[in-house]
Amino acid sequence: MPQTQEGNETMKTILFVGLTDEYHKYKGLELLIRAMPLIHKQVSDATLRFGYIPEEELVKAYQDCDVVVLPSTSAKQEGFGIVVLEAMACGRPVVVSKIVGAARLIRQYSAGIVVANPNDIKELAFAIISLLTNPDMVDHIGKNGRRLVEERYDWKMIAKQIERIYETI
């Protein structure tokens, strides 16, 4: 499990990747911030990293975190959740709300934890805590996520599927 060294202290990192302006409030960052005190009761060394991450540093940010969280709250505004695919491609477990478009596949592949009620701070905190306190689960889920991305989102496979569609047209 990736951990950041600061002095003698190791920290478990929760990563939120997304825009943090008022327009993108539906991404659920506020809920994640409100869940942090509950998380700290069980995982005192948990830290939340969010904000702008330059594209060239994004892969390292995924690799250095323990879990990526996308607790979206609006089905009308949230699409697929590309950051979730990026995290899984890096072998990181994810926690998402059922609103995120990839939620069904995440469940199917056991590639993360899907929170059923997007506005339930306790459920969100519990999902994150269960990963931060179980390194074996993190490893297993991370591998499942990587497998999901390789099987479903490999660019060569997608190109062949598009080619088949064009051939039928």
Image (cartoon, rainbow, N blue to C red):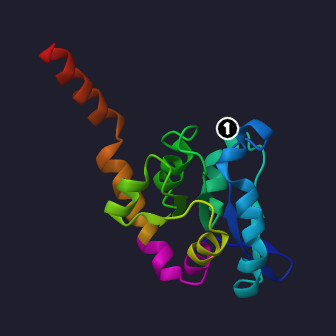
In the image, residue 1 above or below residue 158: below
Q: Nearer the viewer, residue 53 or 115?
A: 115
Q: Is residue 137 magenta?
A: yes
Q: Quadrant of residue 36?
A: bottom right
**Extreme residue toward the left, this view:** 168
Please provide the residue range marked out in magenta: 128-140
What residue does disc 1 label?
Answer: 55
Decide: is 81 above or below 144.
above
Q: Who's the residue at 20% across and 21% down the image?
A: 165
Write down the quadrant of residue 147 in the picture: bottom left
* Prevailing SS of the magenta stretch: helix
Q: From the image, which quarter does the C terminus lie in?
A: top left
Question: In the image, residue 115 lies at what x, y percent?
Answer: 52, 65
| Quarter occupied by residue 5 | bottom right
Residue 45 against residue 4 in the figure, above or below? below
Describe residue 15's horizontal placement relative to residue 34 as left or right: left
